[in-house]
Amino acid sequence: MTTSFVRTMPVVLALALASIGVSAVAQTAAPATAEPTTTEKVKEAGKDAVDATKRTTKKAVNATENGAEKAWDATKSTTKKAANATERGTKKAWNATKKTTKKATTATKNAAVKTGDAVETAGHKTADGMRSTGAAIGEKIPGTAENEAAKK
């Protein structure tokens, strides 16, 4: 062994050991992105919760708006139908009232005419009967025209 060998041997050994150590450190240092801390996990969970709340709130708002719009449309439609039905019913009732009133007026006029005719007929019959009775009485009373006519 020469002196130069003795001097270079420790340097070579040191370099060999160092290269082994460097590769070992490189292998363990590679996952430098280690697990996040608890604080980071909590922050991330908070962000997720906020995002989820925003999404859910937006869906709830949209559902409420859609439901309210459907309810409004249904109310408008039903109100319009009810108004139309009421209008038709009112028109039918008015027409029926006009028709019934016309019938009642006509019936009253007819009854009044018949009553007038019956009163007139009864009056004529009564007058004729009174004339006949008067003539019969006059035939029996001396000095009346009826008595003179009955004698001839």
Image (tube, rainbow, N blue to C red):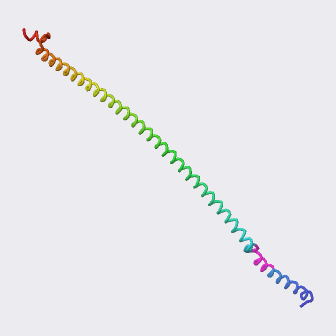
Q: Residue furthest left?
A: 152
Relative to 82, 20 lies left or right = right
The quadrant of the rendering that contains the N terminus is: bottom right
Q: Position of residue 40 (x, y in %)?
A: 74, 70
Q: Is residue 133 magenta?
A: no
Magenta portion: prevailing SS class: helix
Question: Is 116 or 141 nearer to us in this picture?
Answer: 141
Which residue occupies the foreground of this view, 99 or 12? 99
Q: Is residue 83 above or below residue 116?
A: below
Q: Position of residue 66 (x, y in %)?
A: 56, 52
Residue 107 in the image: above or below residue 12: above
Q: Residue at x 47, y 41 (%)?
A: 83
Foreground residue among 104 and 150 = 150
Q: From what the image shows, is residue 121 above or below residue 146?
A: below
Which residue is more in the foreground, 4 or 102? 102
- Residue farthest along the right direction in this orientation: 3
- On screen, residue 24 versus residue 129, left or right, reads right
Q: Position of residue 38 (x, y in %)?
A: 73, 74
State left or right for residue 96 relative to residue 22. left
Residue at figure coordinates x 36%, y 32% from the top left: 101
- In the image, farthest residue toward the front: 142
101 vs 49, left or right, is: left
Residue range highlighted in magenta: 22-32
Q: What is the total number of numbered labels drawn onto the structure image? A: 0
